Image (cartoon, rainbow, N blue to C red):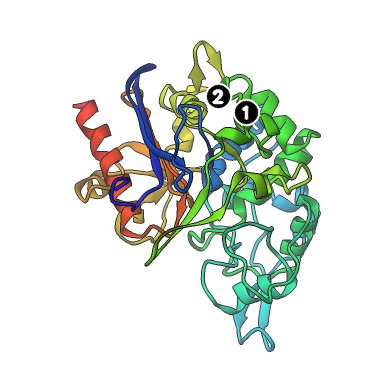
Amino acid sequence: MVDAGQLPNAQVMISRRGKLVVDFRLGYLDVEDRSTLPKDAVFRLYSMTKPITSVAVMMLVEEKRLSLDDAVSRYLPEFADVRVYASGGLDDMVTVPAARPVTVRDLMTHSSGLTYQFMGDRPVQRYYRRHGAMRDTAVGLLPGDAVPAVDLDELVARLGKAPLLHQPGARFSYGYSTTMLGALVARASGMSLDAFLRNRILDPLDMRDTGFVVPDAQLPRFVTLYRSSGAGEVPIERADVSEYRDAARLRDGGGALAGTARDYLHFAEMIANGGSWHGRRLLSRETVALMVQPLLPTGGTGLEDTQFGLGFAIGDARSEAIGGLPAGAVSWSGSGNTYFVADTRRGIAALVMTNILMAGERTDALRKALNQAVVRLRD
C-alpha cells in the first residue's frame, strides 16, 4: 500500500505478555520530501485519545470520587436541563425534556445522545454547526460553520444547550461523549485534564512523547497529515502549521492527543495485562474486567459492527469471523487511521499507526491485517 502510494507510511508494533514480537515501520514522515519515517514518529491519535480518558474516569470511580450512575450534571451543571430532539428541521425544531438525567455511564458507552457535527446532516448536527457546539479541528469543519468553542468549559456550555440526538441510554451514538468525560475528570479531580492524564497515566506508563501539544523539539518527527482522494495522497496539515503547535488549543479528551507508537503500545499493554504495566498498577483487574464487558451494540457496518463496553469496542466470534476484532479482544481507532487491539485473556497488545484521512477500503485492510496477526499470535 505504501509502495502503491495508497498510504504515506505505516508503523506496526505487537507484544505478547510484555515481549515485543513485531516491530516494523515503512514509508515517509513526509511523502513530498521523502523523509524516512523515524522509529519515534509522532502521530495524531485523534479518537484513540478516548480509551485513555475512559481509564482516567475509571480511576476516579475506583477512588469513589464519582460513580458511573451519577448524573453528569452533578459535575457539569450545564447539563442540568438538557432537551431531546423530537421533530422538525433546524429552524422549526421541536424538543422534549430528557426522560432522565444523562449519567456518567451514558457518556462512557456513547449512549448519551451527544453526536458529532460530522456524523450526518440531521437537524441536531446542523444545530452544532450553526451554534459552534464543536471544537476546531482539521476533521469535520465546513465553510459557514460558526466559530468553534475555544476551550473545554465553553464547549461544555454549548453542548449543554444543544438538543440531544435521542433520549439518554437509548442507543449508541458516536460523538462528544468522551470529550465531556474529559471535562468531568477535570472538575471531579480539581486538576486540568492534561495534568491529570500526565500525572496518573502518561508518566506512569512512560508515554513521554504523548500530549495535547507537540513541542518544538518533537516537530522534526511529527508526521504530515494526508487526505485520501482520487488524485492520491493530499497533504492537509504539515508539522510547521499544525494545530498541535498551539499551546492554548482545546484539551479534548475525545480526540486531541498526539503520540508515538511506542507510547501507545505501553497503554495497550497495560489494558492487556489487566491494569498494570511493569509493576505499576493503574487500575484493578476487576475494573478492567468491568470495562471490557459488552454492554450494547455500536450499530456499525462491516468491521465496525461490534459490541461496546466502558470505553472500548469488544470483539466476539461473529466479528472475528469476518476479519474484524478478535473474540474477547478490545480496541478503538482514530480518524487518521491509527488502530489498536488489546487481548486481556492472552496479554497481547497490537497497533498500527499512520496519518491519512478518508482512506475507505484501506482502513479495513489495515485493521484486518492487524486483527489477523493477533489471531495467529494467540493460537
Identify the residue under disc 2: 283
Seen at 63% across and 29% down, the residue is 59
Q: Is residue 239 above or below residue 357?
A: above
How much space separates mark 2 and mark 1, taking CA atoms? 8 Å
Tell me if mark 1 has few (under 14), some (14-19) or many (20+) residues whose alpha carbon lies within 10 angstroms of its own.
few
Q: Amino acid at mark 1?
A: Glu
Say if residue 229 shows up in the picture.
Answer: yes
| Residue 128 vertical position relative to residue 11 in the rendered view, above or below | below
How many labels were placed on the picture?
A: 2
Q: Position of residue 23 (x, y in %)?
A: 35, 25
Query: What's the residue type where badge 2 is placed?
Result: Leu
Which residue is nearer to you in this view: 170 or 138?
A: 138
Between 64 and 225, the one nearer to me in the picture: 225
Point out the residue furthest to the front here.
33
Q: Dot 1 corresponds to which residue?
A: 62
Residue at the spot 44% in from the left edge and 31% down from the top edge: 289
**Residue 325 x, y percent position in the rendering:** 31, 44
Residue positioned 76% across, 59% down in the render: 149
Q: Position of residue 230 (x, y in %)?
A: 37, 67
Q: Nearer the viewer, residue 331 or 47?
A: 47
